[in-house]
Amino acid sequence: MTPLVISICITVLCVVGLYVSSHMYAKSLRYEYGAGEGPSVVESPRARILGGIPNSAYGLAYYGAMLIASWALHIPFIWIGALVAASAAALMSAYLAYSLLFKTKRQCPYCWTSHALNWSILVLLVADGFALGHM
């Protein structure tokens, strides 16, 4: 894949990620204010693993920043920053996926979509690093 195609793919994934994160953030707010319906993963302690802020809020920041960075990956320090952020997101997704399967044990298609997006963005950044000669 060319760097342009990779940037376009990352952009599309980030737009989907922004949608997923905004949906889950709104859901977490509804549950926080007592307007949630039925059991949900947003009630789990693992839905707020970094300082009590909903994971979806971090997702909004991550996907927004990655969306912008995806068009400047030809600059080595931006690519490195994006790779570090994507690696952290992929590791967090691995932990949350494990948690979803073995601890929370609830269905969450939005969660799985987010995990797949995070892993895909990391793979695309690594491919981009090879294409641009950063690796």
Image: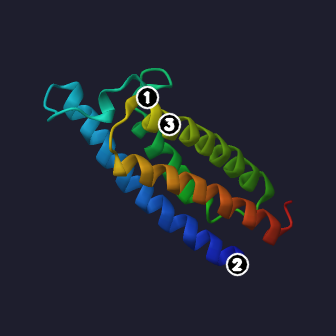
Give the spatial CA distance, label 2 vs label 1: 38 Å
Q: Amino acid at mark 2?
A: Met
Residue at horizontal 55%, vertical 52%? 118
Give the spatial CA distance, label 3 vs label 1: 10 Å
The disc label shown at residue 72, or none = none
The image quadrant where one finds the N terminus is: bottom right
Image position of 28 with respect to 132: above or below: above
Residue 88 in view of the camera = yes
On the image, numbered disc 1 is attached to which residue?
103
On the image, numbered disc 3 is attached to which residue?
96
On the rendered structure, is 93 left or right of 79?
left
Image position of 1 with respect to 102: above or below: below
On the rendered structure, is 112 left or right of 78?
left
Q: Alpha-carbon neighbours of circle 2 within 10 Å: few (<14), some, or many (≥20)?
A: few
* Pointers 3 and 1 in contact (C-beta within 8 Å): no
Q: Alpha-carbon neighbours of circle 1 within 10 Å: few (<14), some, or many (≥20)?
A: few
Task: Between residue 106 and residue 48, name the one nearer to us.
Answer: 106
The x and y percentages for residue 27 are: 25, 39
